[in-house]
Image: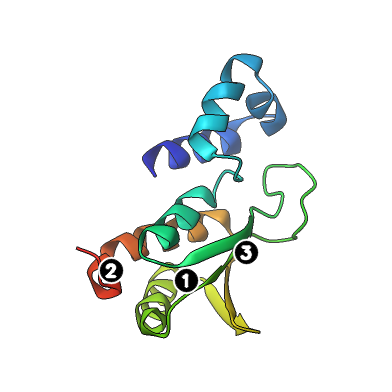
C-alpha cells in the first residue's frame, strides 16, 4: 500500500495529474501496480479481498481530475455476516461511511486518503476476519 500512497502524493503534488498518469514510460508500471483499478482505492480492494470479502466495484471519484462514474471515492463488495463487526470497526477507525443495500456493502468517503486509511484499518484487524 506504500506505493499507492506515494503515487497519490505524487498525483496531489502534480500541476496536472493526467501528465503523471499518461507518462508512456510509467504506463506499464501503473498497470502492474493498480491492476486496472483507480489510484487510491486499490489497497482497499486488495485488503477486502484478502480477508475474504468480494469487491466488485470501485472508483476514486475522479479526485485527480479525470471524469469518473462516481462523484466520490468508494468500494462496493460482498462480505460474510461474520465480517460485519470488524468492517464497521475499521470504517469507524478510518472515518468513512458504510452502507448496506440489496446484499452488498459500500464503503465511501469524501476524501481518497480515508479510503486508503480504511485499507490500513482492515490490515490492523485481519485476525478478526479469521485470517492470521
When asked about the image quadrant of residue 64, the answer is top right
- 10 Å neighbourhood of mark 1: few (<14), some, or many (≥20)? some
In percent of width and height, residue 93 lies at 38, 72
Lower sequence index among marks 1 and 2: 1
Labelled disc at residue 110: 3
Foreground of the two, 112 or 33: 33
Q: Secondary structure at mark 2?
A: loop
Above or below: residue 63 compared with residue 88: above
Q: CA distance from mark 3 to mark 1?
A: 10 Å
Above or below: residue 55 compared with residue 6: below
Q: CA distance from mark 1 to mark 2?
A: 15 Å
Q: Secondary structure at mark 3?
A: loop
Lower sequence index among marks 3 and 1: 1
| Marks 2, 3: nearer the viewer | 2
| Marks 1, 2: nearer the viewer | 2
Q: Residue at x 59, y 45 (%)?
A: 37
Position of the N terminus, as image quadrant, is: top left
Above or below: residue 102 compared with residue 30: below
Labelled disc at residue 125: 2
Q: Residue at x 28, y 66 (%)?
A: 126
Labelled disc at residue 95: 1
- 10 Å neighbourhood of mark 2: few (<14), some, or many (≥20)? some
In percent of width and height, residue 127 lies at 22, 69
In percent of width and height, residue 55 lies at 54, 62
Task: Please report contact status of discs 3 and 1: CB closer than 8 Å, yes or no.
Answer: no
Q: Secondary structure at mark 1?
A: loop
Q: Residue at x 37, y 78 (%)?
A: 89
Position of the C terminus, as image quadrant, is: bottom left
Which residue is at the far left? Answer: 132
Amino acid at each position: 500500500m506504500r506505493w499507492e500512497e506515494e503515487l497519490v502524493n505524487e498525483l496531489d503534488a502534480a500541476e496536472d495529474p493526467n501528465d503523471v498518469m499518461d507518462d508512456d514510460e510509467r504506463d506499464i508500471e501503473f498497470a502492474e501496480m493498480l491492476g486496472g483499478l483507480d489510484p487510491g482505492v486499490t489497497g482497499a480492494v486488495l485488503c477486502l479481498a484478502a480477508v475474504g470479502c468480494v469487491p466488485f466495484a470501485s472508483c476514486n471519484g475522479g479526485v485527480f481530475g479525470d471524469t469518473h462514474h462516481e462523484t466520490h471515492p468508494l468500494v462496493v463488495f460482498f462480505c460474510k455476516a461474520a465480517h460485519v463487526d470488524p468492517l464497521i470497526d475499521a470504517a469507524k477507525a478510518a472515518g468513512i461511511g458504510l452502507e448496506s443495500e440489496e446484499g452488498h456493502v459500500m464503503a465511501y468517503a469524501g476524501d481518497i486518503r480515508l479510503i486508503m486509511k480504511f485499507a490500513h484499518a482492515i490490515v490492523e484487524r485481519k485476525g478478526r476476519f479469521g485470517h492470521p
